[in-house]
Image (spheres, rainbow, N blue to C red):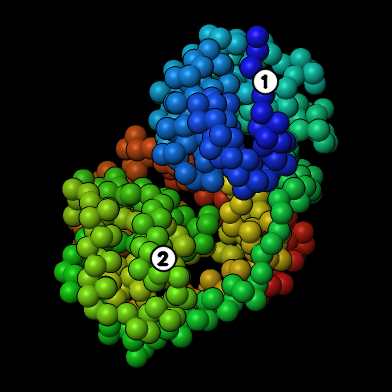
Amino acid sequence: MAKRTDPRLTEAMQALARGQVEHAESLCRSVLADRRRDDLAMALLAQVCNQSGQYEEALQLIRSAIARNGKRADYHGLLADMLCTHGDFRNAIGAYDKALKYQPKHPGVLAGKANTWLRLNEPEKALKQLSPFMKQGNEDVTVATVYAKALIATEKSDEAASVLLTHLPAEREPIETRRTMYFVLGKAMEKSGEYKSAFEAYQEGNSLTKTNFDIKDCESKHNAIKQACNEKTVHKQSNCEDDSRIFIVGMLRSGSTLTEQIIDAHPDGVGLGELDTFPSLLQKYSQGKSFSDFWDSVEVSTLDAIAKEYLDATQASATVVVDKQLGNYQFIGAIASILPNAKFIHCKRNPLSIGLSCFAQKLPPNTNSWANNLRDIGLYYKQYDSMMRHWTSLFSDRILEVQYEELVHKQEEQVKRILNFCTLPFHERCMRFWETGRTVLTLSQDQVRQPMYTSAVDRYEHFGELLDPLRNKIQ
C-alpha cells in the first residue's frame, strides 16, 4: 500500500512553487520533528536548504533521502543539482545518469544534465541530449529553456527565441521556472539585435521577484558604518602580522571574477571565491549589537581573536590569498583594523554597464533586492559609491582601483599593475587565466573560461533611453 503524503508536505511543495521558501522550510521541519525518517520531507527540506545557501545540510539531507528511497529519479536529480552548485560537475553528470536510469524522460533531470553540459562549455552535448524531447511547443518548459540556452551558446539566437515564445506566458509554471525562461529569452533577443524586446523580457523576469528594497534603511546603515569607522578610529588595530590577504570588493558585474582569476592563475596566488567568513565573524562577535555600537567599544583582544579565527578558517598554501566577497565593501574599515596588512582591490566599471548587467541577469532568489528594477539599482549604486569614496579617503595607499574597461583594452598593462599591487612578479600564466581549469561558481563563470573580450564594454548603448530610470539616479 502506498504511503500517504503528509498534507504539510503538499503545502510545502506549493509554497516552494510560489517562492515562499521560509514557509516551506517551516513545514518540512515540522514533519521531520514528527517523522524523522520521512524521505520526502528530507528531500523537500534539502531543496529549501540548497536555495537558501545551506549547502552542507542540503547535501546531507538529500543523501539521507536517497538512502531511504534510492529509486526516485527526482532525489538523484536533486543531488546532481546540488553537486553543480558546488562546482562538482563531473559527479553531477553521474548523479543525473542514475536518475535517468529510473526515469529516462524526467524533464527536470534531462534539463539539469543538459545545463551541466553547458556549464562544462559543451553545448553540442546539451543539444544532442535534448533534441529528441523537443516537440514544437509541447515540451516541458524547463527542457525548452535549457535547449534555448544551448542554441544561444551555438549562435542560434533567433531559433532560441522562437522556441521560448511558444511557451509564453507560462503562467502555470513555478515562479523560478518563469524567471529563468524570461531571462534566457531576453538574452536570445539581445543576441538577435532585438533590444526593445530583450529589455521587455528582462523586465518581465524581474517583475516576478518580490521587491522589498528600502533605500532609506540602506542609507542609514551605510552612514552608521562610515561614522563608526572614521579618521579618528582607523588607528585601532589588531596585532596580526599576516600580509597575505587581498580583498576584492565592488558591485556585482564589475569584473571582480576576472580580476580574481588573473591572480589565481599565478603560481603564488589563490582565489577562495565569495566567502561569507568575514561578515559572519562580525555578526558573531557583535552579539546582536549594531555595527557602530560594537565598533565603538571593541577591544584589541577582540580584533586579535577575529583575525585569528578568520585566518584559521581561510588557510591556503599561497603567498597571496584572495577573498572575493563583494559585500565586504561595507566593512573595509573593520577589515583594515583586524588585518592591518591586508590590501583591497576595488573593481569598477561604467555604472550603466553594471546596472544593465545586473538588470539582465537572473540573480538567486531572495538576494540583492535592489537589483529588480533600474531605479533601485541606481539608488543602490549611489550608496555603494559613497561608501567607497569614504574608504578611499582613509586608505588610499591600501586600495587599488581596477577599471574593467581598462582591463579588457590594456590587458598586459593592467595585469602587471594588479600583480605589482599584490607584490607578485609578473607571470605569463596570468595572461592566459582561462586555461587554469579552476571551478568558478559566480555569475561570470562563462566569461572567465575564454580569452578577454571587449563586446560587453559598451553593451548599454544599444538600450538608449530605456535605461533612463537608471541614468537619472546615478548622475
Which residue lies under the disc numbered 1? 4
Q: Secondary structure at mark 2?
A: helix
Residue 354 occupies quadrant: bottom right
Q: Could you say where residue 359 lies in the image, as x and y percent from the top left?
A: 66, 54
Residue 166 occupies quadrant: top right
Q: Could you say where residue 393 lies in the image, as x and y percent from the top left?
A: 40, 83
Q: In front here: 163 or 59?
A: 59
Residue depicted at x 51% and y 17%: 69
Q: In front here: 366 or 184?
A: 366
Residue 287 occupies quadrant: bottom left
Q: Hey, what amino acid is under mark 2?
A: Gln
Taking the image as shown, residue 227 lies to the left or right of residue 239, namely right
Between circles 2 and 1, the one closer to the viewer is 1
Determine if residue 261 is in view: yes
* Mark 2 and mark 1: Cα distance apart in space: 43 Å
Which residue lies under the disc numbered 2? 283
Q: Could you say where residue 142 lies in the image, as x and y percent from the top left?
A: 68, 27
Taking the image as shown, residue 44 lies to the left or right of residue 429, namely right
Residue depicted at x 62% and y 74%: 217
Label ID, residue 185: none
Considering only vertical position in the picture, is 348 above or below 160? below
Instruction: Work out which quarter of the rendered image holds the C terminus and state it.
Output: bottom right
Considering only vertical position in the picture, is 407 above or below 168? below
* N-terminal label among 2 and 1: 1
Q: In front here: 237 or 440?
A: 237
Residue depicted at x 64% and y 17%: 3
Q: Hey, what amino acid is under mark 1?
A: Arg
Considering only vertical position in the picture, is 3 above or below 467? above
Residue depicted at x 59% and y 77%: 219
